[in-house]
């Protein structure tokens, strides 16, 4: 499909038409926090904000009923749970949050088994990604293989001032663009050149810094002093994991009694001390620095080893939300620095290949 | 699409008391007719609906598919509830999960099986398989240790194991209480290795027990010139999903539930944790 142009004044008209496809979610400023909310009459989207809460929970819900059970005359009956899920659109999701779903796919749709509810929700959801014209202070997507203009999701749009440039990236993306037929014009060659220029400029606008390689992190894994220093102020509150668009650790809990009830899959956090506590008392990650190490290693080393992608999109929410100002960027800089100091010269720092 | 969390109802057809706190449960699916197809060393997630779910080794022989067994020690809240179950009660089963012992690799090899405490559980299916298919494997040596004689599991199997050709069983306990007759070894299970007659060049070693025990066993085996690649260990971690998603059982980049629970020693050695580091 040819790239399109949508006049700014027609954005609302397109949004209205999208409602015929399914539920439409968009960034909304709440009283205390901003998040992705269902856009109805009276709920106005605000595309200028980067939401405090990522849209992760719209597809990977915080508490998901995974089965229901009853004990009747025929014995134990275990049933698949879950209501009918309608089509949905997440409109105005930023490239980092959009890319986070690709990372969640790698974790949750792995070859062993697809996470059932996640895969259903993911299939029914269309992501309309809005490029970031103004990066935030805590943004570092370009350091972790992203871009504020990254073309991810099903439709990609960028604000050109008086108009939006709209590009469908998948068949479902084309379908929702078609819903706005009549509102769009074909993009001209000049529009395309302008967009290409903007893509390059936006990429440059987010500062990049050296990050450690998988090899680096494996080398400092046993450097207890490094991790203890890093975790010194960490409270293990888990805020970073709950607001992280790629964190996906969970627990399974039953609600009910032995005769009937439901089983839920519920977000959990590797930062909590009982996360790895086994029956009998064995706990391989009792110390909080080991838990912080696990989180950092999982995102910046294990994820790359297992799936070939970094488990972080550089959205910066963990930095903004941390009550003791732990800054993951400082960790990355320090880790890269420690490694360079031990294995090579400082000059090598600037042209390191993270995936080497 | 299939919902991988669905558990299948299974009825308890027999319960055998192994020790004061450990029982072996015989199970049979009530609806699923296919039985359980598994490799020894794999595990099931057992559900007690309303209480939760946990990973437990399958302890019966894989050659009997229509029934299967789990040997469960009372250690926490879920196992506490399981301990109260009676014959005729129903549990939910999903599985099997995990890697299992490399039985294909073990064909025609001698097997050195070393276990501590309830760590014998995931090895029992393998032992039974080696007895039932006596011509498929070489000699089998089982070296088993526990804290006290009363903590030994599968004691009712020992005569059967001992009477099979070319199978030797060695036992040891840390402590023999006064008044108990104990004709076998005393001390750590590592002490039993001196009785081994099998040639490490044509053998595989299968180990399960506390990590500290496995560390010393691996060290001793390497001294006895077992090749690293011929040593296999079964690890244990808390799990929720069994499908490499929930994140609990990770050791380095590996998931114990899918990459393990049985790992070769070189795999464990490559992990950043130095878990079973066996410096010689």
Image (spheres, coloured by chain):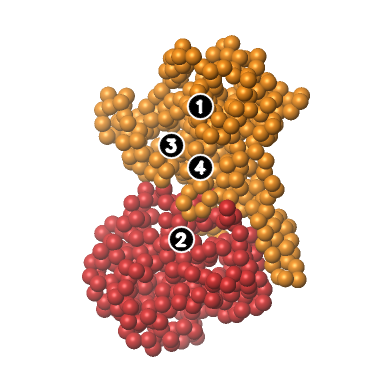
Q: Mark 1 points at which residue?
A: A1
Front one among B57 and A94: A94
Query: Spatial distance from mark 1 to mark 3, Cα to Cα?
Result: 31 Å
Q: Tag 3, which secondary structure?
A: loop
- Res A343 → quadrant: top left
Is A18 left or right of B157, judged from the image as shown? Answer: right
Look at 44% across and 84% down and name the residue there.
B158
Point out the frontmost of discs 2 and 1. 1
Q: In this view, does B25 lie above or below A101?
A: below
Residue B102 in sight from this viewpoint: yes
Query: Spatial distance from mark 4 to mark 1, Cα to Cα?
Result: 26 Å
Q: Where's residue B82, x and y in %?
A: 63, 69
- Res A214 → quadrant: top left
User: If the image is split into quadrants, where does the C terminus of chain B sit?
Assistant: bottom left
Q: Tag 4, which secondary structure?
A: helix
Label 2 chain ID:
B
Q: Which of marks 1 and 4 precedes in the sequence?
A: 1
Q: Tag 2, which secondary structure?
A: loop
Front one among A284 and B51: B51
Q: Mark 4 points at which residue?
A: A105
User: Chain A hue?
Assistant: orange
Q: Are marks 2 and 3 on the same chain?
A: no
Q: In this view, does A6 lie above or below A18?
A: above
Query: Spatial distance from mark 2 to mark 3, Cα to Cα?
Result: 26 Å
Q: Do labels 3 and 4 share a chain?
A: yes
Label 3 chain ID:
A
Q: Mark 2 points at which residue?
A: B98
Front one among A44 and A86: A86
- Res A208 → quadrant: top left
């Amino acid at each position: 499909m040819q790239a399109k142009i949508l006049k700014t004044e027609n954005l609302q008209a397109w949004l209205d038409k999208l409602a015929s496809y399914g539920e439409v979610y968009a960034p909304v400023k709440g009283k205390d926090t901003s998040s992705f909310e269902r856009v109805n009459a009276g709920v106005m989207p605000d595309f200028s904000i980067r939401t405090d809460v990522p849209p992760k929970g719209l597809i990977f819900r915080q508490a998901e009923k995974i089965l229901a059970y009853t004990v009747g005359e025929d014995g134990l009956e275990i049933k698949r749970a879950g209501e009918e899920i309608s089509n949905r659109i997440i409109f105005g999701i930023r490239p980092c949050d959009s890319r986070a779903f690709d990372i969640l796919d790698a974790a949750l749709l792995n070859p062993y088994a697809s996470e059932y509810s996640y895969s259903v929700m993911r299939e029914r959801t269309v992501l309309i990604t809005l490029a970031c014209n103004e990066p935030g202070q805590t943004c570092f997507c370009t350091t972790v293989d992203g871009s504020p203009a990254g073309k991810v999701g099903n439709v990609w749009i960028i604000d050109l001032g008086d108009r939006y440039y709209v590009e469908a990236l998948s068949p479902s993306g084309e379908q929702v663009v078609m819903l706005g037929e009549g509102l769009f014009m074909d993009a001209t060659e000049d529009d395309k050149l302008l967009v290409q220029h903007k893509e390059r400029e936006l990429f440059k606008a987010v500062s990049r810094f050296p990050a450690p390689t998988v090899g680096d992190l494996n080398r400092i894994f046993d450097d207890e002093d490094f991790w203890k220093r890093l975790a010194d102020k960490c409270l293990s509150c888990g805020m970073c994991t709950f607001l992280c668009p790629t964190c996906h650790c969970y627990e399974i809990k039953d609600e009910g009694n032995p005769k009937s009830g439901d089983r839920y899959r519920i977000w959990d956090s590797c930062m909590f001390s009982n996360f790895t506590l086994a029956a009998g008392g064995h706990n391989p990650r009792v110390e909080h620095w080991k838990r912080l190490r696990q989180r950092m290693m999982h995102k910046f080393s294990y994820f790359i080893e297992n799936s070939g992608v970094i488990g972080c999109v550089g959205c910066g929410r963990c930095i903004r939300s941390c009550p003791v100002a732990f800054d993951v960027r400082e960790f990355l800089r320090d880790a890269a620095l420690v490694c360079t100091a031990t294995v090579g010269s400082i000059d090598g720092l600037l042209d390191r290949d993270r995936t080497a | 699409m299939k919902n991988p969390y669905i558990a299948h109802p299974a009825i308890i057809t027999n319960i055998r008391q192994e020790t004061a706190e450990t029982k072996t449960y015989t199970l049979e699916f009530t609806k699923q007719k296919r039985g359980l197809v598994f490799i020894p060393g794999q595990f099931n997630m057992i559900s007690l609906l309303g209480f939760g779910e946990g990973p437990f080794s399958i302890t019966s022989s894989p050659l009997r598919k229509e029934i299967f067994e789990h040997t469960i020690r009372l250690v926490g809240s879920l196992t506490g509830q399981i301990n109260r179950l009676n014959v005729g009660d129903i549990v939910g089963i999903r599985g099997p999960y995990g890697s299992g012992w490399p039985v294909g690799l073990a064909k025609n090899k001698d097997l050195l099986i070393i276990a501590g405490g309830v760590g014998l559980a995931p090895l029992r299916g393998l032992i039974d398989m080696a007895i039932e298919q006596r011509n498929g494997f070489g000699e089998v040596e089982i070296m088993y240790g526990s804290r006290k004689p009363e903590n030994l599991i599968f004691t009712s199997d020992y005569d059967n194991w001992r009477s099979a050709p070319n199978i030797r069983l060695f036992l040891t306990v840390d402590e023999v209480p006064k008044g108990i007759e104990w004709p076998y070894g005393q001390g750590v299970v590592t002490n039993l290795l001196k009785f081994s007659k099998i040639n490490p060049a044509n053998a595989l070693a299968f180990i399960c027990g506390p990590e500290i025990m496995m560390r010393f066993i691996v060290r001793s085996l390497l001294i006895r010139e077992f090749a690293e690649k011929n040593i296999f260990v079964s690890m244990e971690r808390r799990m929720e999903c069994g499908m490499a998603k929930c994140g609990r059982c990770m050791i380095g980049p590996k998931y114990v539930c899918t990459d393990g629970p049985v790992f070769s020693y070189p795999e464990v050695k490559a992990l950043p944790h130095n878990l079973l580091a066996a410096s010689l």
